[in-house]
Amino acid sequence: MNGLQLLGTGRCLPGRRVTNDDFARTLDTSDEWIAGRTGIRQRYFCAEGETAASLAVEAARRALEDAGLGPEKVGLCIVATFTADRNTPSLACQVHQALGLPETAFCLDVNAACTGFVAALETARCLLLGGQMAGPCALVLGAEKISGLLDFSDRSTCVLFGDGAAAAVVRLDPQAPWAAVFGARGDSRMLHGGGKEDPYLAMDGRGVFRFAVETVPVCIRAVLDKAGLTLDQVDQLVCHQANSRIIHSIAKKLGQDPARFYENMQRYGNTSAASIPLALDEMRRSGQLQAGQTVLCAGFGAGLTWGGVLLRA
């Protein structure tokens, strides 16, 4: 079937830890209010000198170390991000330069917002399947510096997001189950920002909640149907870490115990494309994610976009 096998993971968080109580000092909010509505208790923001690229490079370095591989094995580097430090060169090329990846390694960024990492996984699989990559492995990252797009006087958005990067090293595995499902619902107002006219992120929170709870269960069922699997045959379920109440609602719609869905937004907030690989790295290093397990990852976010993929640990 030629699915993807996960060989190694790595993450990098910036140096500035910001708690809900820190926000409460300048905003009409509280730890109880934020945590009760989102599950988030803290997040990390980049300090002076930290960039999306610096986070991505370190996360990628740690993923290669975890996989026990040198840069010469990388035939492809893809970074999922909507907050690259510059328009060009890509974050992926900056990772390439810093790690000394071979000149035969192809590099590109993808922007599907919070669905970006799962989209990057499928992009990597397709390119590896094409047989044109000079190395057998792909380095797939999610990296975001969202703090630069936040209006810190707007409590409805600034308390939700965090910065961070995480990476995964993957290769084709003919024995690994694979299925991918993606979709989009063009909507430029529900969650937007970063432009000349709207430099800060703005979001219709209720609308995004309804969208996620509607689309993600359908997406997960579609991935399972394509793969010929049931939920009982999936070992780990990892959704984009936007809001604990969203994940619990998704679990309820699928008739599952919410405990089956990994959650770490309480530590990092919403890190967009970095959230799923951050979770995978935590799970792998804690021993929760074991070799040979089947993982279903599902993302949803601005665009609006959604997507789901399977991979084997």
Image (cartoon, rainbow, N blue to C red):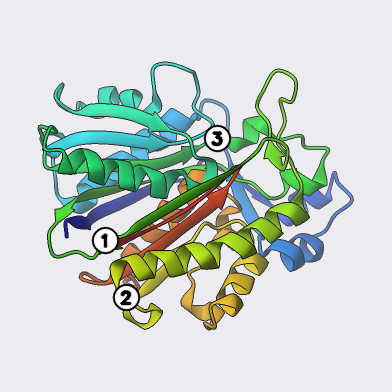
Earlier-in-chain disc, 2 versus 1: 1
What element does badge 1 sit on?
Answer: loop
Residue at x 49%, y 72% (from the top left corner): 261
Q: Quadrant of the N terminus?
A: bottom left
Residue for point 42% across, 42% down: 142
Q: Which residue corresponds to mark 3?
A: 145
Rounded to the nearest whole Å, what is the CA distance between mark 2 and mark 1? Answer: 10 Å
Compared across the picture, whether 303 is left or right of 4 comes to right
Which of the 4 image quarters holds residue 285? bottom left
Q: Which residue type carries mark 1?
A: Trp
Residue at 32 percent across and 64 percent down: it is 284
Residue 161 at x, y percent in the picture: 64, 46
Question: In the image, which is nearer the foreground, mark 1 or mark 3?
Answer: 1
Image location of residue 39, percent across then percent down = 66, 65
Disc 2 element: loop
The residue where tag 1 is placed is 178
Q: Which mark is residue 81?
A: none
- Which residue does the image show at 37% across and 70% down from the upper left? 224
Sequence-wise first label, 2 or 3 = 3
Disc 2 target residue: 229
Number of residues whose C-alpha sits closer than 10 Å to that of mark 3, classed few (under 14), some (14–19) or many (20 or more) = many
> Which quadrant of the figure contains the C terminus?
bottom left
Q: Tag 3: residue type?
A: Lys
2 or 3: mark nearer the eye: 2
Camera-side residue of 8 and 17? 8
Q: What amino acid does circle 2 point to?
A: Leu
Spatial distance from mark 2 to mark 3, Cα to Cα? 36 Å
Question: Is 113 rendered above or below residue 132?
Answer: below
Reply above or below: 137 against 198: below
